Amino acid sequence: MSHLMNTYTRLPVAFTHGEGAYLWDETGRRYLDALSGIAVNGLGHAHPRLVQAIAHQAGRLIHTSNIYRVVQQEQLADRLCTLAGMSAAFFCNSGAEANEAAIKLARLYGRQRGVELPTIIVMEKAWHGRTLATLSATGSRKAQAGFEPLMTGFVRVPYNDLQAVQVVAEHNRNIVAVLLEPIQGEGGIHVADIAYQQALQALCRERGWLYMIDEVQSGMGRTGKWFAFQHTGVVPDVMALAKGLGSGVPIGACLAHGPAAQVFKPGNHGTTFGGGPLVCAAALTTLEVMTEEGLLENAARQGERLKQGLSRALAGIPGVLDIRGQGLMLGIELDRPCAELVTRALEQGLLLNVTADKVVRLLPPLILSQDQCDQIVALVEPLIRQFLGRSQ
């Protein structure tokens, strides 16, 4: 009997090692990884440069705390802010913590401007984390159930609906920020229209709100650019990052720009582990490898190949409603719950998952090759065809 808390419904497999886009289990069976640790392992598994960098840093220094300067943290902040066109970075340990920092920043920003009840506009079907603040911002009643009372200070509107935001603006003087995922991951791979994102940022500027984006899943090259917001031509005031930033080593970041970059002062926010030498060395190496190996271009190229391949293979199949996403962040929406496809895929040597009950989610590593891309299509097509045929 395991002494682990019963918080996960785990699949009946344990992996011993990986290489590139593949994992091997305890019996020696190989699996093609089309999930990459839920958008984490962008460099794939056991990338030699990453392994070397982590081992080298671990042999020198792992942790000192933020009481002291951390040179690698300063270097990473410089690199990320240059790539994003932003001004300042705070490092933490996860996406939830990065969003928590963004929420605290927005509240303090509002208080500094005389707003007594700072309120953030959030979206239906959003996912921002499982801490009490980020859970309250999340748009999933299933995830929230049992953890009430939730935190106040959030107003929820439909995704991709500018008019709904404008209505709130006219009736609520406490709004200080909007929090948006450019692509909703857990919500079902919904992509916000470029015009919507541009108009939303313009509205924030007009109202003096912070335009905050959650790129925990869509950032770090997954959409074919460093960050999904770069497809829109507008720079956010605040951005949350994590997942692919450390290629499997836990690190999150909250980046800020303009007035938002000046909100936090010593004592306002902090962390014991965040931004330590080890995780920052991993993140710096991740950025170097992504640049040198052209992984942004590869994500765009293979993502388009994967999307087109799936569209051709699944065309005309009753029950397939949509194939959407950007880069290597794709979803296949079916007309019925399809969680069993995760186990069926595992049996065929493919790792994927299902989100929002009816959406098959694909998040392969950014190193995905053309042949591996075609393998995913070849495995997914019969799985979905057979599932829909048998479940009618």
Image: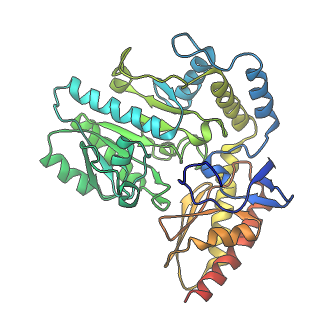
- Name the one closer to the observer, 31 or 20: 31
Indicate whether 221 appears above or below 187.
above
Question: Residue sitting at 50 percent across and 40 percent down?
Answer: 95
Indicate whether 31 appears above or below 272.
below
Query: What is the x, y in percent for residue 327?
Result: 60, 54
Indicate whether 220 appears above or below 265.
below
Indicate whether 62 appears above or below 294.
above
Q: Quadrant of residue 283?
A: top right
Observer able to see residue 345: yes
Classify residue 34 as left or right of residue 320: right
- Name the one closer to the observer, 23 or 111: 23
Observer able to see residue 20: no
Question: Residue sitting at 60 percent across and 22 percent down?
Answer: 276
Q: How many marks?
A: 0
Query: What is the x, y in percent for residue 316?
Result: 59, 84
The residue positioned farthest toward the front in the image shown: 1
